[in-house]
């Protein structure tokens, strides 16, 4: 199944995205590990020019911070970030 | 001569009298003028009192390609930092502090000598620079699209100005107030670059991020011609910034909409500043820059939810206060907002 990472904001204010195909199990794991934190995910009030990241897994929209991704999912997220266009 | 004029009536001189002198001496070094103005007169003009012994406090850290902040403090040797990025942010921070202190009487980010803390080498190939509420942070870039975010002094001054705003107008980071927040950061960013290079408004390229975006024909933003900073870039496409209200981009107030397009619609007040400064001529920081500084730090006329129209009114008000009715500066500011289509 396809997952898509969307990166917005930053100093340049660009919208960039990357998509990859993953196994159903991997997609489930991403939802399970990232969705709970997404409910309370809020940008810090005084941060300026920050990036914002959203992972789209099917219809699920999951805002998250790459710095807080669990170790086991890090390589998938890093791969997506490295392929943003 | 300036000293004599000011000293001759130092206790009784009126703000109006100083404003007249202010106009008379606007072509001369502001540093000399400013050093001659007494604290009470400075206060009446809305500037801070003189902090005669003020010196900047600058600290540079390396995040060591990790994301913990601030990271490890770097030591500066007699000939500067051995790390090129460290030296750049040190010098950029110093030039920014100097502009705020020399020209506007402001001692650092909070106006009270706050340490300027900067961390370099944040993350791995991180393609951004940001202000985190306490300090500035710079990534190395990926080396293909973006170089190091320490490559442009205007980016360093842009981030530091986000800090200045946090301690003054603190404009909400959404919609028009957010675009103003971004624009003020670009305005002070370009003035630090111009002053460092001793460029007047005609000599300046008015580009923000001319080095960080790799490729001679690319920059991040153009204040002179918003929407022209990059065209047909293989990855980024073309610069979406508008220059006038007719092209204002209505975007959702969400992360995906960049909070109503704060980095996009900033092109409009950026263009207003450019037109005003260019029409006035000379060094931007001596004239229109002063107006923008007093407006940015005037929390009554520039509240946290200010609109473009309120920014226009605030700058017109301060142009009148600082330079007088019928002045070149007031006309230039009026023309700037007019050409940007802000009513």
Image (spheres, coloured by chain):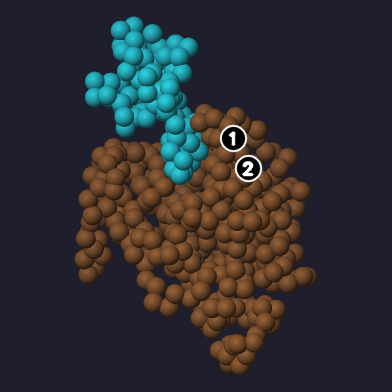
Chain colours: A cyan, B brown
Q: Quadrant of the N terminus of chain B?
A: bottom right
Tag 2–tag 1 contact (CB < 8 Å): yes
Q: Nearer the viewer, residue B91 or B200?
A: B91
Visible residue check, residue B282: no
Q: Residue furthest right?
A: B326
Residue B267, how many percent across, how many down?
61, 46
Q: Quadrant of residue B245?
A: top right
Residue B238, how many percent across, how many down?
55, 36
**Mark 2 highlights which residue?**
B176
Residues beneath discs 2 and 1 located on the same chain: yes
Q: Residue at x 56, y 64 (%)?
A: B203
Q: Quadrant of residue B147?
A: top left
**Mark 1 highlights which residue?**
B260
Secondary structure at badge 1 equals helix
Residue A76, how many percent across, how many down?
30, 21
Q: Is residue B91 left or right of residue B331?
A: left
Q: Check the image and report above or below for B214 versus B163.
A: above
Question: How much space separates mark 2 and mark 1, taking CA atoms?
Answer: 8 Å
Q: Within 10 angstroms of label 1, few (less than 14), some, or many (20 or more) residues?
A: many
Visible residue check, residue B92: yes
Q: Residue at x 38, y 18 (%)?
A: A35
Q: Within 10 angstroms of label 2, few (less than 14), some, or many (20 or more) residues?
A: many
Q: Nearer the viewer, residue B103 or B128?
A: B103
Q: Which mark is residue B53?
A: none
Secondary structure at badge 2 equals helix
Q: Check the image and report above or below for A65 versus B95.
A: above
Q: Is residue B54 left or right of residue B122?
A: right
Q: Quadrant of residue B314?
A: bottom right
Q: Is residue B153 left or right of residue B322?
A: left
Q: Residue at x 35, y 60 (%)?
A: B115
């Amino acid at each position: 199944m396809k997952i898509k990472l969307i990166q917005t904001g930053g100093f340049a204010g660009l919208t960039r995205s990357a998509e990859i195909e993953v196994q159903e199990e991997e997609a489930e794991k991403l939802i399970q590990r990232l969705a709970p934190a997404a409910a309370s995910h809020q940008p810090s009030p005084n941060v300026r020019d920050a990036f914002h990241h959203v992972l789209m897994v099917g219809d699920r929209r999951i805002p998250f911070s790459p710095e807080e991704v669990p170790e086991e999912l890090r390589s998938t997220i890093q791969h997506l970030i490295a392929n943003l266009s | 001569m300036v000293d004599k004029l000011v000293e001759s009536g130092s206790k009784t001189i009126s703000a109006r009298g100083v404003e007249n002198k202010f106009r008379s001496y606007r072509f001369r070094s502001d540093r000399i003028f400013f050093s001659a103005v007494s604290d009470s007169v400075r206060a009446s003009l809305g500037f801070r009192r003189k902090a005669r012994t003020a010196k900047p406090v600058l600290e540079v850290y390396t995040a060591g390609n990790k994301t913990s902040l601030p990271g490890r403090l770097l030591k500066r040797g007699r000939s500067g930092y051995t790390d090129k990025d460290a030296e750049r942010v040190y010098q950029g921070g110093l030039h920014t502090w100097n502009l705020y202190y020399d020209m506007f009487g402001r001692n650092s980010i909070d106006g009270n000598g706050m340490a300027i803390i900067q961390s370099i080498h944040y993350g791995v190939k991180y393609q951004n620079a940001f202000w985190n509420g306490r300090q500035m942070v710079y990534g190395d870039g990926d080396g293909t699209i973006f170089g190091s975010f320490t490559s442009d002094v205007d980016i360093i001054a842009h981030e530091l100005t986000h800090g200045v705003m946090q301690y003054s107008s603190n404009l909400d980071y959404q919609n028009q107030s957010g675009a103003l927040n971004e624009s003020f950061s670009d305005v002070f960013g370009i003035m630090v670059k111009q002053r460092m290079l001793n460029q007047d408004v005609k000599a300046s390229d008015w580009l923000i991020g001319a080095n960080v975006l790799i490729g001679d024909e690319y920059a991040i933003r153009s204040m002179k011609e918003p929407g022209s900073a990059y065209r047909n870039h293989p990855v980024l496409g073309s610069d979406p910034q508008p220059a006038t209200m007719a092209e204002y981009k209505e975007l959702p107030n969400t992360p995906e909409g960049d909070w109503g397009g704060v980095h996009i619609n900033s092109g409009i007040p950026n263009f207003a500043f450019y037109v005003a400064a260019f029409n006035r001529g000379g060094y931007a920081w001596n004239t229109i820059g002063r107006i923008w500084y007093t407006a940015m730090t005037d929390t009554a006329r520039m509240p946290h939810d200010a609109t473009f129209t309120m920014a226009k009114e605030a700058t017109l008000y301060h142009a009148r206060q600082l330079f007088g009715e019928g002045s070149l500066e007031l006309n230039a500011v009026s023309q700037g907002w007019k050409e940007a289509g802000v009513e």
